[in-house]
Amino acid sequence: MSERTQTEAPLAGTDRPLEMGGREFTSRLILGTGKYRDNETMMAALRASGTEMVTVAVRRVDLDRSSDEAILNHLDPDEFFLLANTAGCYTADEAIRYARLARAAGFNEWIKLEVIGDEATLLPDVQATLEAAKVLCDEGFKVMAYTNDDLISALRLEDAGCVSVMPLASPIGSGLGLINPFYIREIKSRLSVPVIVDAGVGTASDACLTMEQGVDGLLMNTAVAVADDPVAMADAMRLATRAGRLAWLAGRMPRREVAVPSSPTTGMLD
Amino acid sequence: MLPRLHLLTNDDLLADERLLRRAGALMERGGGRLALHLRGPRTPGRRLYELGVAFAGPAAATGAHLLVNDRVDVAMALRGSASGVHLGGRSLPPAEARSLLGDEVLLGRSIHGEGETTGEGLDYLMVGTIYRSESHPGREPAGPARVERLAAARGLPLLAVGGVTPGRVGELRRAGAHGVAVIRGVWDAPDPGRALDDYLARLEPDGREDPPMSSKTDPSTRTMTLVVNGDEREVPHGLTIAGLLEALELVPGTVVVERNREIVPREAHAEVTLAEGDQLELVHFVGGG
């Protein structure tokens, strides 16, 4: 049986834009801007990926000028929609503080909320994430919340007012791919807001497989940034994200435990 | 840092309805390098206060400093909108003014004789009358040598006033003046904006201010200690957030400032004067996932 819904029938391989928080995005791929070996490579990769939204982190200015890390020296905020994150925060208060600083930069009121609960796995502290999400949504932020692949947490985050819920495919930076497709499908089937799978994609097949679950988009960083050729990988991710999306929209054939011939069984020679 | 160009007014200028427009244009031109003094010995406090309120916006928008002459009460009523107070010989004693105004406000004083005592708590001195001036026709000009002697003796930044034309700025700076104060040199110029530029160019020949972190080379300047991104920094007393960003050579539009855990909106950077012990976080966007 097809996993797609009636409302999203494909039109000759076309897709609708991703609608989220009152904005429309043609690309369903969101890229991070960390870990690239240099800014030129990063910019080339972002462009090759076709992404319209990129994540950035909030950090202290290096007053000794030992590094040129101000990303806006390289990245034009008119070319890419900036999604600031709260990466590295371990408490709700900390994440709220970072979100407010990010908004004061003056670009938009969107925030990728992540509150980490454990240093070894970087798995999210869902309770703290929910707490911060409530405060930030009340303050008018458009919150995209990074969370575990847990349906109940996802529902709570949607109730809190998040514009998107972002369950992980597998731990941040692990490249393990989609560990639990069933849970991701559960979440997608029960939420009204877009579900973006964030973290864990390692290569193009992971991206494609994840999109084939029917989710609305993907957010990734490491898989592209640390590939031997980040620009080629960005292009691959663009194609894979789109391929997975179209395959899901097209509606896959049912799985059967028996073989069924593709060619007519009649009209064979005696 | 203490601006090098101080533009004074008089009672006639303060009564002129065009003042806001004219001075606003000059503030825009001078930005943080300019201090406008609301000076009018016979102007009522009410008028001074109203002008101060009217100039608060332009001052905040341009980074220009706004100083009130003599009237400590008016400056207090203006709260954060006035950067400081300039005292005269008939004003409150500096120590009293300082205790009323607090440590964040720029405080200076005029002196005319070299033997004149100045009092405690001052950030700068204004020394006159250096050249023959229409504002003080009866005074015998003291010449740049007075600046030189006072600079050595008093250990405070000096502003030279009285008949200072752009052409005289060079010798005053060489004599040790931090900057100059003018009235007619700008207001009565055929093109006040160009006159302002001329003064500024000669005061800062390389087009930029000395870094405010100059306390090491000039131990006499009053300084305060801030904690910026976790590290202690000595900066000049009375520095604004805009001044700090400028001194650190940061592009203001890309940096977000948190002062004592509260975000200071960008529009307020020029008007927020920092205080001893302030904890500042300067953050920006970096690459991240």
Image (cartoon, coloured by chain):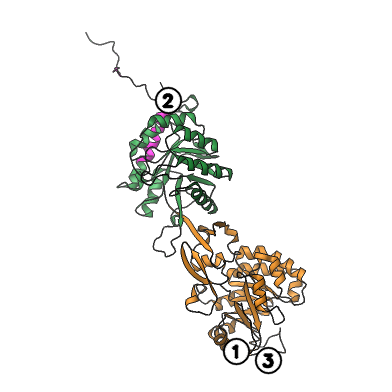
Chain colours: A green, B orange
Q: Position of residue A64 (x, y in %)?
A: 42, 65
> In the image, are marks 1 and 3 on the same chain?
yes
Residue A230 seen? yes
Kindly identify which residue carries mark 3. B140
Say which chain tag 3 marks: B
Q: Can residue B195 be seen at all in this image of the molecule?
A: no
**Residue type indicated by callout 3:** Glu
Residue under numbered circle 1: B146
Q: Foreground: A41 or B266?
A: B266
Query: Is disc 1 on the same chain as disc 2?
Result: no
The total of numbered circles placed on residues is 3
| Amino acid on which the number 1 mark rests in the picture | Arg
Say if B175 sits above or below A110 in the image. Answer: below
The x, y position of residue B266, in whole percent, is 57, 58
Q: Position of residue B230 (x, y in %)?
A: 46, 62
Q: CA distance from mark 1 to mark 3?
A: 12 Å
Chain under disc 2: A
Q: Check the picture and name the quadrant holding the N terminus of chain B.
A: bottom right
Distance between mark 2 and mark 1 Cα atoms: 90 Å
| Residue A57 magenta-highlighted | no
What is the spatial separation of the Cα atoms under label 2 and label 3, in whole angstroms? Answer: 96 Å
Q: Which mark is residue A3?
A: 2
Q: Quadrant of residue B61?
A: bottom right
Q: Position of residue A203 (x, y in %)?
A: 33, 40
Residue at image point 74% right, 70% down: B48
Marks 1 and 3, the one that precedes in the sequence: 3
For this rendering, which residue is in front, A4 or A184? A184
User: What's drawn in magenta, residue-wise?
Assistant: A236-265
